[in-house]
Image (cartoon, rainbow, N blue to C red):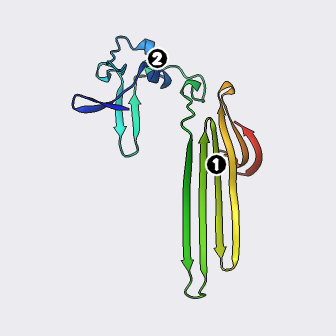
Amino acid sequence: YFKSMTQTLEPCLTKEKLIKYGIAIQELHGLQFDNEQCVLLEHSPLKYTYNAANQSLLLNAPSKILSPIDSEIADENIWDDGINAFLLNYRANYLHSKVGGEDSYFGQIQPGFNFGPWRLRNLSSWQNLSSEKKFESAYIYAERGLKKIKSKLTVGDKYTSADLFDSVPFRGFSLN
């Protein structure tokens, strides 16, 4: 969260948050904290920029105070299951053809549930073209992080990543 420091807002970064963000606290000598245990940033080498439009905080730190990174996977201390939530994305279209006098409908729904470490995702569509009606589920899968083995488990219908080759659909499970 942000708090008012004199005439400006400043992020409240606790010692624990800085450790989670990869800052080597032992390299920051003489850190000062306020009564809420937030680091007084004006007395530290840390600089920040806040972008209100996309609600992102960019924290800049000298490389000498960064914790070494051993792998491409984020440290499990910063893994966060987040909150339980329901997500919904949708799209709807209607078209009337004056030439043939036909109506066409298309609807797409993309629900999601976050429950503990699990993420359930689906993409389904419905269309009515002339007299042909069609319902289709592009994918439905459940996914979660596995901290102990620093992996992600996916179960259900999904597509492979397109990092190297074209994406292909699969039904089953994957462990990345």
Q: Are marks 2 and 1 in contact (CB under 8 Å)?
A: no
Q: Amino acid at mark 2?
A: Ala
Q: Viewed as shown, does residue 35 lie left or right of 156?
A: left
**Badge 1 element:** strand
Q: Amino acid at mark 1?
A: Arg
Number of the front mark, 2 or 1: 1
**In the rendered image, is residue 10 in sight?**
yes
Residue 167 percent coordinates (x, y) = 69, 51
Label 2 Cα crowd, 10 Å radius (few <14 / some 14-19 / many 20+): some
| Front position in the image: 73 or 10 | 10
**Quarter of the image where the N terminus is located:** top left
Residue 135 percent coordinates (x, y) = 69, 65
| Front position in the image: 139 or 68 | 139
Label 1 Cα crowd, 10 Å radius (few <14 / some 14-19 / many 20+): many
Q: Up-down: is 135 above or below 60?
A: below
**In the rendered image, is residue 166 in sight?**
no
Residue at horizontal 61 percent and vertical 39 percent from the top:
115
Residue at horizontal 48 percent and vertical 26 percent from the top:
21
Furthest-left residue in this view: 7
Residue at horizontal 60 percent and vertical 52 percent from the top:
111
**Badge 2 element:** loop
- Examine the image and state in which quarter residue 57 appears: top left
Q: Which mark is residue 24?
A: 2
Q: Viewed as shown, does residue 150 lie left or right of 66?
A: right
**Quarter of the image where the C terminus is located:** top right
- The residue that label 1 is drawn on is 121
- Examine the image and state in which quarter residue 8 appears: top left
Q: How far is the residue under mark 2 from the one under mark 1?
A: 37 Å
Q: Viewed as shown, does residue 144 lie left or right of 32?
A: right
Sequence-first tag of 2 and 1: 2
